[in-house]
Amino acid sequence: MKNNINMFDQFPGLGEEAKIAFEKELDSLLVDKGGLLEQEGKVCDHLYFIIEGSARSFYRKENKDITVSFSLEGEFLTAMHSFISRKPSYENIEAMEKTKVARIKYESLLKLFEKHHDLERTYRLILERYYVSLEEQLIFSKFKSARDRYLDLMDYRPKIIQRASVGQIATYLDMSIETLSRIRGKI
Amino acid sequence: MKNNINMFDQFPGLGEEAKIAFEKELDSLLVDKGGLLEQEGKVCDHLYFIIEGSARSFYRKENKDITVSFSLEGEFLTAMHSFISRKPSYENIEAMEKTKVARIKYESLLKLFEKHHDLERTYRLILERYYVSLEEQLIFSKFKSARDRYLDLMDYRPKIIQRASVGQIATYLDMSIETLSRIRGKI
DNA sequence: ATAATCTTTTGAGGAAAGTCAAATAATCAG
DNA sequence: CTGATTATTTGACTTTCCTCAAAAGATTAT
């Protein structure tokens, strides 16, 4: 449990009772590099929290894939669209290295909301963060050139540049591998 | 009040009490074409519901602007990023024609949440919808060519094509006015 | 260690969409 | 209604980034 402690640090409003009830519903999971936490075509039933390691969310289109987000230790993660809508996901989530996650089932979460309104609030806050980061990503992708998108990523999330491959970063920044490689060469 | 009735139709789980309490906190507003509901630099304090008319959310970058979304009658609307984070907004929201909105203050909403948990849930659902549509927009902007983005908009939201200008649609679809004009010419 | 595989870099050429400029069409104010 | 302003279309040219191809560099399995 020591590992999970920081999970709630981000949500000071949460009462002891709710934390305990929440933790009771968690189970934990170890995934190897390249292993899938979520797969397109299936409804996403879990909200994850990364204890150790990192993950990548991506869509597949024909042969190429499009990275939507990278997640590191201490972050919550799910295929939000499917988790929300209860429809099959278009999203895949894979571990970028050996990764340990805690996770809670959608159903369990809804049940907890009935008893613990502060948990529903916390979930709302997670959702809000998700929203904010998505919006930032959208704006940023529209305003900036390929080169600036890369420089921004270096500023904001340098760890990702260390931990993801050029190919993965390229699909995240919406440019070809070759373009990214050339940009990196000229810094 | 007759006008507002459909506001809750979208949220069947909501109890009578909560509806009444919510409506008590609403005030309504009439904005002329081009009038601003929200302005960059200010914290967004309101959640809006469009009773009649339409609105456009956009960011400004140097001289050009970037349209993030269009909203029509029956839809909720706010500068979500600022509304959530309580930081100054980068977003502007303008009426695209003479527009009637109902709105509730952020503070009022939070107070209502204390008493009416079903309202907090409804708000969560609004947030979820916001999220889903944003994600769809992000994916769609990455997967598709300029031409396909336009064809998609025609399919999904034909009313927008009728009501927004070529310039506004172009900034929404992230292409130049000229490119959009050429695409329209070739259909 | 060595071959086999996968990833990244580099080069050449091409496609998509952008910019600038001018012409045409639509809208608005008096 | 008419001139003035604003929006849209069209054309010529440029830029950005993509694709294809091949070489160089890492990584992995045997």
Image (cartoon, coloured by chain):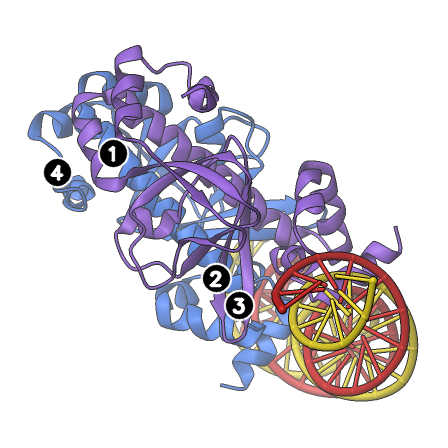
Chain colours: A blue, B purple, C red, D yellow
* Residue at numbered disc 1: B109
**Where is residue B23 shown, x and y percent of the image?**
31, 24
* Residue at numbered disc 3: A143
Q: Is residue A23 visible?
A: no
Q: Estimate the spatial distance between the alpha carbons at disc 3 and disc 2, rounded to whole Å.
A: 10 Å
Give the residue type that dot 2 points to: Tyr
Identify the chain of the residue marked 4, using the numbered disc in the image.
A
Give the residue type that dot 4 points to: Gly
Quadrant housing residue A41: top right
Give the residue type that dot 3 points to: Phe
| Above or below, A97 relative to B63 | above
Circles 3 and 2 on the same subunit: no
Quick one: A12 or B64, which is closer to the camera?
B64
**Where is residue A164 shown, x and y percent of the image?**
46, 61
Q: Are marks 3 and 2 in contact (CB under 8 Å)?
A: yes
* Residue at numbered disc 2: B59
- Nearest-to-viewer mark from 2 and 4: 2
- Left or right for B8, reference A20: right
Q: Estimate the spatial distance between the alpha carbons at disc 1 and disc 4, rounded to whole Å.
A: 18 Å
Q: Is mark 4 on a helix, strand or loop?
A: loop
| Above or below, B50 relative to B183 | above
Circles 1 and 2 on the same subunit: yes
| Above or below, A19 relative to A4 | above
Residue count near mark 2 (Cα–Cα under 10 Å), binned few <14, some 14–19, many ≥20: many
In the drawing, what numbered circle is on residue A13? 4
- Left or right for B100, reference A176: left
- Nearest-to-viewer mark from 1 and 3: 1
Q: Is mark 2 on a helix, strand or loop?
A: strand
Identify the chain of the residue marked 1, using the numbered disc in the image.
B
| Above or below, B84 relative to A15 | below
Q: Earlier in the sequence, mark 4 or mark 3?
A: 4
